[in-house]
Image (tube, grey):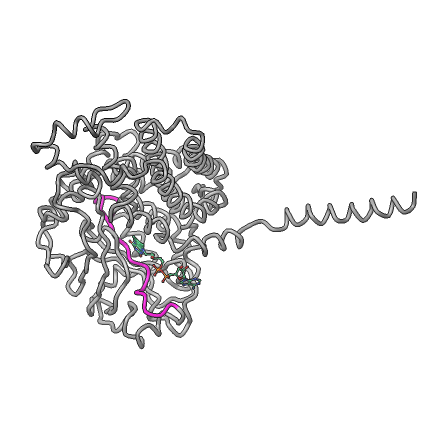
Amino acid sequence: MPARTGAQYLESLRNDKREIWLNGEKVENVTTHPQFEGAAQSIAHLYDLQHQHPETMLMDSPDTGDKVGTTFMFPRSKEDLKRIQETTKIWAEASAGIMGRSPDYLNITFACYASRLDVWSRYGNDQGAKNLGEYFRFIRENDLCLTHSIVNPQVDRSVAEAEQGGGEVSLRKVGETEDSIIVHGARMLATLAPFSDEIVVYPSAGGQGIRHEDAHYALSFALPMDTPGLKFICRDSYSKQRDTFDYPLSSRFDEMDAVVIFDNVHIPKDRVFIDGNVDLYRELTDATNWRNYIVFQAMTRALTKLEFLFGLGHMIADMNGVNKFNHIQEKLGEIWSMKEMTRSALVSSIEGATTVLDGIYVPDERPLLALRGLMPKYIPRAMELIRLIGGGGFLLTPSKADMEGPLRGYIDQYYQARNAPAEEKIRLFRLAWDFIGSDMGSRGELYERFYLLDSFRMTAQAYLIADKEKDSNMVQKFMDEMTLHENNLVEK
Ligand SMILES: Cc1cc2nc3c(=O)[nH]c(=O)nc-3n(C[C@H](O)[C@H](O)[C@H](O)COP(=O)(O)OP(=O)(O)OC[C@H]3O[C@@H](n4cnc5c(N)ncnc54)[C@H](O)[C@@H]3O)c2cc1C
């Protein structure tokens, strides 16, 4: 089946028996439930966008010749990397960068994995590698939407996964039949779960520390969302049942986060990619260059957020006339600088791309990892700057009901901006608050801090991959020359 339309995507969500729980209620149909409908429609729009920009977002399937998503591509040139990035950018702009787990996130992950079956087949894992290759073709040809859950719940981060809650919490293998393995336990988080077709599990970067004796925790597999025994408990919904005028972002882009419970779930053996292979589990993230690809996707989306924040900041400052003050200009210049550093690092990651195997292009990790450590500082800082630019105006915004009520005349008079009527100003300030300050805005900030591990460990990783020799040699050469210079001075 070629790339899906929004209508086809929504139809697939209607026809299964997934167990999604929200606020004590089992949600029967996420496409019509008031708390989920808005986001389901927004994701459907992403699928429609593919057909509106086919030259960028679609490519010929190497297997069937059907038009399939570009983000499933194995990039074989810098042009391919640019095209993948443009596709991510179109999807990111559709939600102002808010939907971090738009389908390209996992399309790119699995394209990366499937391009490195040589790595997946290490340590005797030929069958797992074969399964993964077939699974990749299945999701590409059917244009499936995936959620992933790669971190075990927070119980005691100071001990091994296997010791969480006396060994009764983290996801692990507990049995096996002729056709399946049986897993039990929980995973901390699966964003987009209510809206996905399948859930995938694979090693997190933190999984590199897994112990050999904990092989039953070293798992990778994929399952349909309505597999018996799978249960998803959602956090509070931010999709308020209010007019989009009041909450323009929360009402449409709450991609939802859920804890996943695996209650003795059977995984068919052809859906298992790693079963207890600790050495492979530890190596996989680095050896497949997964981080290069995923940070490339993630920073492209983050660039969209910074662009949006700069646009918001400028429009607010211009409306209130505060952009004539030099410290406001400095604040806007700071957001612009973060945006430009991000854009430049992404260009650099394509320019510095290298090839592996038979010519698969891998973005340069150095600028990406530098950004990865900085972005959890950039975006919260940019949000803080918007607050400083906008002042108290964010809170003093009448609702749609007020706008339609008897006080409209007063609103038009007293909420006007220097260069815009009241309604336009109110719309802008409500949009900005939903981005930086509402419960949705706060979730967005937390997301940027933690969605890919944390800034601290990523920045430490930057030090680990850094070429220390070149710069140390420069220092050493300088010191050697100093000694020579001092000796020469003495001789004179
Ligand atoms: C909104 C949101 C959406 C997410 N979506 C997904 C998703 O779809 N799928 C998914 O798998 N995950 C998802 N994540 C989870 C993400 O993978 C984790 O949040 C992330 O790995 C950090 O783990 P944690 O939140 O448990 O924090 P913790 O690991 O508990 O960290 C808390 C604090 O302790 C520090 N800390 C913890 N362990 C160590 C250590 N070993 N060394 C040094 N410092 C340490 C951290 O730096 C941090 O400051 C999401 C997270 C958020 C916030």
Residue 39 spot, x, y in % from top left = 18, 44
Return the residue nearer the eye: 405 or 108. Answer: 405
Q: Is residue 432 magenta?
A: no
On the rendered structure, is 76 left or right of 482? left
On the rendered structure, is 466 left or right of 102? right
Secondary structure, magenta segment, majority class: loop
Q: Is residue 142 magenta?
A: yes
Within the displayed image, which quadrant is ligand 1 positioned in?
A: bottom left
Task: Return the residue found at the far top.
Answer: 419
Residue at screen point 34% across, 40% down:
387
Residue 6 found in image quarter: top left
Q: Is residue 189 above or below residue 145?
A: below
Residue 1 seen in this snapshot: no
Residue 234 seen in this snapshot: yes
Q: Quadrant of the C terminus?
A: top right
Q: How many marks?
A: 0
Residue 434 spot, x, y in % from top left = 25, 41
Return the residue nearer the eye: 63 or 220. Answer: 220
In the image, the segment drawn in magenta is 139-157
Residue 48 spot, x, y in % from top left = 19, 35
Q: Quadrant of the N terminus?
A: top left
Residue at screen point 39% across, 71% down:
160
Residue 256 spot, x, y in % from top left = 22, 51
On the rendered structure, is 363 left or right of 40? right
Q: Is residue 153 above or below residue 355?
A: below
Return the residue nearer the eye: 419 or 172. Answer: 419
Return the residue nearer the eye: 461 or 441. Answer: 441
